[in-house]
Amino acid sequence: MADGAIVVPICQYGGEFTSGPSGNLIYRGGEAHAVDVTHDSSLESFKDELSKVFHVDVTDMSLKYFLPNNMKTLITISCDRDLQRMVGFTANAAHVDVFLISRQENRSKMMVIEFVATNASLVSLRVLAVNLVLTSV
């Protein structure tokens, strides 16, 4: 990828993650805005833009995205290098979603529990934990 490449992620806020049939995470609801990011963008300027478009204080928020072809693992963006990696990893992707998640919601709501029952007996209980303990941005 050239350093001047632009990625336009769809930034989402205010929705919830649910578990899909194959264990993938699906985001539903909330607002979405397209925000352009280059390899030279700083995390601070990206967060400032998100703060403006969503009209929220992003101080206690985490930014996360999926790698192309992996809808099971959210990757955290916590520094300029993480943002540069996201641009590099997703420059040729059909689309990129970045999720703005409240750290408090992340701790209390972002655990999705999927029950699979057969013949009225519990066959399996699978817990998909979405980074329950986050580090500071």
Image (cartoon, rainbow, N blue to C red):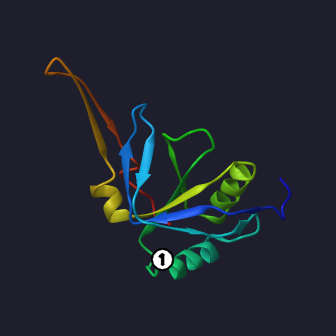
Looking at the rendered structure, the kind of residue marked 1 is Phe
Circle 1: is it few (<14), some (14-19), or many (20+) Cα within 10 Å? some
Return the x and y of residue 32 as percentages of the image width and height: 51, 66
Return the x and y of residue 72 as percentages of the image width and height: 48, 39
Q: Is residue 16 above or below residue 112?
A: below
User: Which is nearer the eye, 81 or 89?
Assistant: 89
Under circle 1, the secondary element is: helix
Q: Is residue 73 above or below residue 99?
A: above
Name of the residue lying farthest toward the top:
119
**Residue beneath the point at 40% across and 38% down:** 20
Q: Is residue 57 above or below residue 17?
A: below
Q: Is residue 87 above or below residue 70?
A: below
* Quarter of image, res 82: bottom right
* Quarter of image, res 50: bottom right
Return the x and y of residue 62 as percentages of the image width and height: 47, 63
Q: Does residue 80 appear left or right of residue 62 in this picture?
A: right
Q: Does residue 98 appear left or right of residue 82 in this picture?
A: left
Q: Which residue is mark 1?
A: 54
Q: Does residue 136 appear left or right of residue 126 in this picture?
A: right
**Residue beneath the point at 55% across and 59% down:** 98
**Residue beneath the point at 41% across and 34% down:** 23
Q: How many marks?
A: 1
Return the x and y of residue 21 as percentages of the image width and height: 39, 33
User: Which is nearer the eye, 104 or 13?
Assistant: 13
**Residue beneath the point at 52% across and 41% down:** 71
Q: Does residue 28 appear left or right of residue 90 in this picture?
A: left
